[in-house]
Image (cartoon, grey):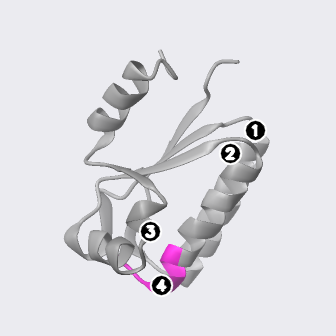
Amino acid sequence: MSAVVKIIQPDGVFDGPKGSQFRQEISKLVDNGANLVLLDFQDVSFMDSSGLGAVVLSLKTVRAAGGQLFVCSLNDQIRMLFELTSMDRVFEIFANREEFKKAMKSNKEID
């Protein structure tokens, strides 16, 4: 089965309300067959704990459907949040989209 890669790029402040919208978007993607999801945080200026909670719940949704969820382009604040909560050990984190694409090509998961 070929990989269906979807990229989500939230922006601004990633908090509770945005997290709720984000989780709905993830559910739709999974329902539509996406099995590799990349969250690109390039345009997110700040993430709070409820935003991180939404990302963790989304990871569970994607994994329950047999998929994988990756993150990239974390700013210093988001990286620190991931490290303080040990989420940097749970998520595979890439420096940017290009690094993600290189890794996926070397794993032969995407063309």
Percent coordinates x, y for residue 87 in the rendering: 44, 68
Q: CA distance from mark 4 to mark 3?
A: 12 Å
| Mark 2 surroundings: few (<14), some (14-19) or many (≥20) residues within 10 A | many
> Amino acid type of disc 3?
Met
Q: Which residue is mark 3?
A: 87
Q: CA distance from mark 3 to mark 1?
A: 27 Å
Mark 2–mark 1 CB contact (< 8 Å) = yes
> Amino acid type of disc 2?
Leu
Which label is found at residue 73?
Answer: none
Disc number lying in front (4 or 1): 4
Disc number lying in front (2 or 3): 3
**Residue visible at 41% across and 73% down?**
86
Residue nearest the observer in this picture, 111 or 106? 106
Q: Which residue is mark 2?
A: 29
Q: CA distance from mark 4 to mark 1?
A: 28 Å
| Mark 3 surroundings: few (<14), some (14-19) or many (≥20) residues within 10 A | some
**Residue visible at 32% across and 26% down?**
102
Percent coordinates x, y for residue 4 in the rendering: 61, 29
The range drawn in magenta is 46-52
Percent coordinates x, y for residue 70 in the rendering: 47, 48
